[in-house]
Amino acid sequence: MKYLLVGKNGVFETMIVAMGFLGLNDMNSCKEFANVQMENTGKTIKIGTDAKGNDVYVVGNKFPDIVEIVNNELKALSNKPVNSELTLIKIATQGDNLNSYLIVLAKIPLLGTLFAHLAKYLTLQSKAKLIQQGQNLRLVHQAGLDPKVNRVIAAKPY
Amino acid sequence: MGVLRIKKVIYHDHGGAHTSVVASGIHIGKLNPDETPSKEQLMDIPFFDKTTKNDFGKIKYMGIGKDGNEIYTLGTKNMDMGILLTNLVNLQGISDQFVFYNTMPYVDNRLRLGGWLSRGMSLPAIGRPLVLSGIKKEYARISSFVKSICSNLGGSNNEILIGR
């Protein structure tokens, strides 16, 4: 099984959420973190492998919803069984829109590095929250729960 | 004699309504590659200047090419999603079934503005003439792009494996 985490900014917030998903906390484990040149290139980056042997990847795209639709369409079109080996998880985080703009500005020659540093700083400021978000995601997926499905919670027994 | 597997050929661009549809139309033989089409011929192609915002990400079947491959179009809302599409099929282990071609290099400013007015702003009365003129201007380039794809996909093999 492979997990692909898709967020607006693949090498910023999404990468930290993926670290939380894998139970990592050390920023050195992600060499591509805050590498603006890698952002929105469409390249998937492998973050690691979880205890069950599942590979975890991240990718950034301005429209994660569309990536999900395309992925489902490709699955449906392929001649493989529906339960494919790839699970796509959309990541939405607080402040990802602001960071998207900063990353665009970060590509301006000379001045861009200022915006890149600001985007990195803002992401690291919310590192604890993002790691927690990743850990919560892992729990949901380990339990085999689909967060989109509404469930009726059983009443507490007497 | 080699074996040629049938592929799903996906032409993609920003909106999935113009250059990708024209490229598909040429590939399936609905448009003559050597002759610039008329307005009526272009409007006759399915999905040409007819998509909506809900169509982003949806892969649309256009037909079967002369080479036996299945031809589709896709609007990605991105300038170039080719690398991501290739990575998605690689991760799913289905890369042998798909090939992706980006038709965005054939979108000039006239086509971009016309497409935005016609599809994005729902003003086809203003946008469509620009789109048609842009497509006619770029038609020869799109046509030669599709010809090169057809010759690459066809190769020298002459046996088609229908069972995939």
Image: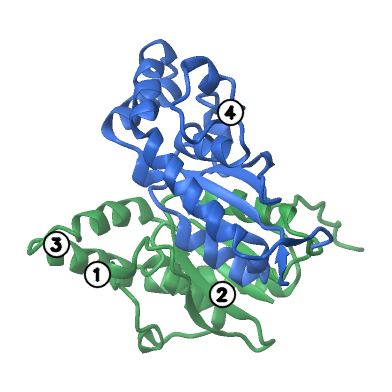
Chain colours: A green, B blue
- Extreme residue toward the top, this view: B125
Q: Residue at x 13, y 65 (%)?
A: A114
Labels 2 and 3 touching (C-beta < 8 A): no
Which circle marks residue A112 in the picture? Answer: 3
Residue ID for mark 4? B47
Separation of disc 4 and disc 2 at Cα?
A: 43 Å
Q: What residue type is labelled 3?
A: Gly
**Side of B99 where B115 appears, left or right:** left
Nearer to us of marks 2 and 3 is 3
Q: In the structure shown, which secondary structural element does the residue marked by tag 4 occupy?
A: loop
The verdict on a common chain for dots 4 and 2 is: no
Mark 2 or mark 1, which is nearer the start of the sequence?
1
**In the depicted structure, whether residue A98 falls above or below residue A13:** above
The verdict on a common chain for dots 2 and 3 is: yes
Foreground: A130 or B52? B52
Residue A90: tell me if it is visible.
no
Labels 4 and 3 touching (C-beta < 8 A): no
Separation of disc 1 and disc 2 at Cα?
A: 22 Å
Q: Quadrant of the N terminus of chain B?
A: bottom right
Residue ID for mark 2? A135
Residue ID for mark 1? A121
Q: In the structure shown, which secondary structural element does the residue marked by tag 3 occupy?
A: helix
- Extreme residue toward the left, this view: A110
Separation of disc 2 and disc 3 at Cα?
A: 32 Å
**In the depicted structure, whether residue A50 falls above or below residue A128:** below
Give how far across and how far down residue A5 sits, in percent. 53, 66
Which circle marks residue B41 in the picture? Answer: none
Q: In the structure shown, which secondary structural element does the residue marked by tag 2 occupy?
A: helix
Q: What residue type is labelled 2?
A: Gln
